[in-house]
Amino acid sequence: MFRMNKVGITSLLIALVLFTVGCSSGNTKEVQSESTNLSEGKQGSGEFDWKQFSGQEISLLANKQPWITTLEPHLKEFEQLTGIKVNMMIFPEDQVRQKALISLQAKSDEFDILMSLKSREGLQYYNAGFYENLDEYVSNKQITSPDFDMEDFFEGPLNGEKIDGNLIGLPINVEGPVLYYNKELFEEYGAEVPSKLEDIESAASKIVKGSKGKIHGVTLRGVPGALPYTFGNFIYNNGKTWLDEGKSNFQDPDRIRAIQQYADLAKNYGPPGVIQYTFYQSSALFAQGKVAMEIESTNELNTIIDPKSSTVIDKIGVIPVPPGPGGSKLTQLQWGISINKFAKNKEAAWLFLQWATSKEMQLEMALNGIASPRQSTWEDEKFISSMDTPLKKEWVEALKFIMNNANPDVGPPAEDQAQVRQIIGEMVGKVILGDKSAEDAAKEADAKLTEVLNHK
């Protein structure tokens, strides 16, 4: 999880004014061409050679999400550029974490590169010695392209890939939660776009009643480990953070209200089985026009408007998660890619990290709706010219708001993020299922979290 200083935030906000997303086939082809030509003029101009590890194989462990979906069709370009074969290991997020932890604990070289969310497992993996330190790679001119340009990364996302000042990954995106809504359904059933947190329930109720239950009011995350990302915004907007002076206190009235709000939305207006939902299920349902609202990451836009599966491409609006009694302070984070400390082909993996986070590939990602951690992306003419629809402009404004009102914590600060997020997710889940009241679930969660936070 990164924390921006004022200079970093200012720079990012200036860049975001230029921001947009675009998915036109013409832009994609142009970027593909630039990516393919990444090596032109490099191999004979000094020590660095893209083909210096030709013949080696590397494996990437990644969770299925828009970044990897956009990157995968370009892998042949990397293989042609370097002569390095790339094997993909793609699973749902929870499975990736399970597999990664088991392999890393066994000091396995099963994969060379892993997608990693430093705000979640970063401290745990770092303290266990699972990440390769990349600082020496960056300074090694023989294995680092002269065009890689580390200074092009925004300060915040890059710092988010450092622990104790050590670079342990490279950022691949920037994201935050928003409220997507179906304008056509809102108009058909006379619902108003939420301007406050409590208005989400009012709009959902009106649409569910008006459609006689044919349309679900809202979809959001229900799986325990994934839920805190979207639930945390209810905590923040009710004027709280995760802890009170380092102590768990979900029995606080404002946090109880946040738990009840989230649970009521899921239980009363969410789709059947929402307790098992992550962003996969939510975005698929919203894209099919079967739900009026979705609370999810900015990076899900490309999935929602994918012409192969979406029926709502021209019907979507997007706003930041509305403010509550405590205003609006929304979660902001970035994913990164890191090298397995126990990998055999670390230098070849480093070439992949450079290629995957290069200016050319970050532009490709941005044109497909994935916010870039590189400054050059926001200044690119293709990027600027693609800001040509109301949806894109709304998306830009939502991202600008998130960056200016960011909270970097997806859960209580702790080394064992998996456990604390599981406890929080189970707490809210029990209220969604009606197994416990918000008060009883909070009391139980406080006891469990206190034990974890005290390392007992």
Image (spheres, rainbow, N blue to C red):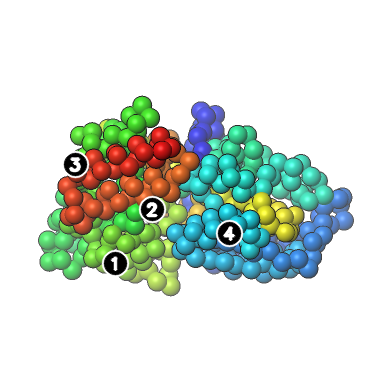
Dot in front, 4 or 3: 4
Q: Earlier in the sequence, mark 1 or mark 3?
A: 1
Q: Position of residue 411 (x, y in %)?
A: 39, 42
Q: Position of residue 257 (x, y in %)?
A: 20, 40
Residue name at image x 18 percent, y 62 percent: 188
Kindly identify the amino acid type of the residue bearing the numbered disc 4.
Ser
Dot in front, 1 or 3: 3
Q: Which residue bears the numbered disc 1?
A: 289
Separation of marks 2 and 4 at Cα, in angstroms:
20 Å
Separation of marks 4 and 3 at Cα, in angstroms:
39 Å
Q: Is residue 441 left or right of residue 454?
A: left
Disc 2 is placed on an element classified as loop
Proximity of marks 1 and 3: CB atoms separated by less than 8 Å: no
Q: Which residue bears the numbered disc 4?
A: 103
Q: Earlier in the sequence, mark 3 or mark 2?
A: 2
Kindly identify the amino acid type of the residue bearing the numbered disc 1.
Gly
Kindly identify the amino acid type of the residue bearing the numbered disc 2.
Gly
Kindly identify the amino acid type of the residue bearing the numbered disc 3.
Glu
Residue name at image x 54 percent, y 51 percent: 116
Q: Which residue bears the numbered disc 3?
A: 439
Q: Position of residue 105 (x, y in %)?
A: 58, 54
In this view, the residue farthest toward the bottom is 308
Q: Nearer the viewer, residue 450 or 253?
A: 450
Asked whether the viewer can see residue 393, the reply is: no
Disc 3 is placed on an element classified as helix
Disc 4 is placed on an element classified as helix
Image quadrant for the C terminus?
top left
Proximity of marks 3 and 2: CB atoms separated by less than 8 Å: no
Q: Where 50 sits versus 320, above or below? A: below
Separation of marks 1 and 4 at Cα, in angstroms:
40 Å
Q: Which residue bears the numbered disc 2?
A: 225
Dot in front, 2 or 1: 2
